[in-house]
Amino acid sequence: MTDTIFAVSSGAPPAGIAVVRISGPSADTIVRAVAGRAAAPRRATLRTFRDGAGEVIDQGLLLWFPGSATATGEDLAEFHLHGGRAVVARMLTVLATFPACRLADPGEFTRRAFANGRIDLLEAEALGDLLSAETEQQRRTALAMADGTLGRQVDAWRTAILRLAAQVEASLDFGDEDPEVPDGIGIATQAEHIAAALATALTAPEVERVRDGIAVVLAGPPNAGKSSLLNRIAGRDAAIVSATPGTTRDVVEVPVAIDGTAYLLSDTAGLRDGTDEVERIGIARARTRIADADLLLWLGDDPPPAHPSTLWLFPRADARPDQSPPDRLAVSSETGQGLTPLIAWMQARAATLLPTTDAHAISRRQRAELTEAHLAMRDAATETDAVLQAEALRRARLALDRLTGRSGFEDLLDSLFGQFCLGK
């Protein structure tokens, strides 16, 4: 029998209001015991909450949601209490006295929603992103994924693939006898349509850029002003600034949010022939970061390395105002000169890498499963052997099942829901 779980769902007290949520098969029994009688479904009711001895815990609102059309797919209730520590602690203590009723694990309410089919794995992952969102872009992208649009599209692809698989099986069994059975050409055409739709889905931006920030790397020779410029963009002293060449020997990462967009700024070691092993390691890491950067801010006098999104800067422009070359943006960490056009360039490039408003982005895991489904459907569209065609359709369906969580993998679920807070 499944335990009934409870937790504070409104954040840690003290607060004006605290919401204690319970979910599970004993929820109705607990509500009647604590609130005195049953409650009307989905209506806020003023009640006095009592413990087993009849002593008053608090007076507040009770909301009752009978399963299975609830957030968790189970009977669910919420006690809206005054948010003092003592009130909340007493309510939690009382709930723990009921048989098979316990404090929820992190993310357990959402995990039950997934297990009971109220949400799929895509929506659960989006909810995790929404809970951790710190910028407006992160919030919008998580909401776009949480609305279930992609999950519904995946279900439509899966249904179409199952239909195609049935047609292939029919062609194997009855193709020579029944003229109504679709031929290989018709099946291939339908498979090609699904493959094209999957290819379109794969063009979605990477959610990691939204979640972790656009990777902006500051690079150039030693003493070019990289650390000073990073501090100026970040608005704080995040990197050590020194006149001594080679001060920065490892990558210094600084997350920042600018106008609702997350960036990960990386200060790198100055590029030169390293004088010792530690510096050479730092320089190697700097070159790797340059290659992986979304945006490169180059502060050297020599032309920048090949990179698709590079802004060539002329640093310390305040000290040499008449020397700025026309093909470089003059910037000064001291005065802030050039910072506005630099940020504007970053924002313009970021807009090409991030999803548009209300559009979804996909994670590396989701992209891997969509890629597998796309390749399998391409095989199904080009394969002439019906047996191999059926196998390709099976591979595509399994990839989509992994995408939405139909075929479970507990390690992934433990990792995902373990990041959620208590009461979610």
Image (cartoon, helix red, strand yellow):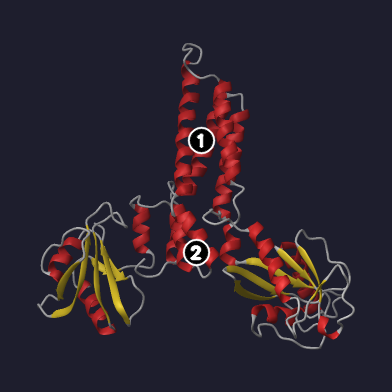
276 and 110: which is toward the camera: 110
Identity of the residue drawn at 51% across and 35% down: 394
Question: Circle 2 is placed at which residue position?
Answer: 139
- 91 vs 213: above or below: below
In the rendered image, residue 32, in percent from the top left (x then y), is placed at: 13, 65
Is 14 placed left or right of 155 in the picture? left
- Image quadrant of residue 385? top right
192 and 399: which is toward the camera: 192
Mark sitting on residue 104:
none
Q: Amino acid at mark 2?
A: Arg
- 280 vs 136: above or below: below
- Image quadrant of residue 337? bottom right
- Is disc 2 placed on a helix, strand or loop? helix
Is 309 placed left or right of 118 in the picture? right
Mark sitting on residue 394:
1
Identity of the residue drawn at 21% across and 65% down: 44
- Is disc 1 placed on a helix, strand or loop? helix
Identity of the residue drawn at 15% across and 71% down: 47
47 and 117: which is toward the camera: 47
Q: Amino acid at mark 1?
A: Arg
In the rendered image, residue 191, in percent from the top left (x then y), is placed at: 56, 31
- Quadrant of the frame with the C terminus: bottom left
Identity of the residue drawn at 17% across and 66% down: 31
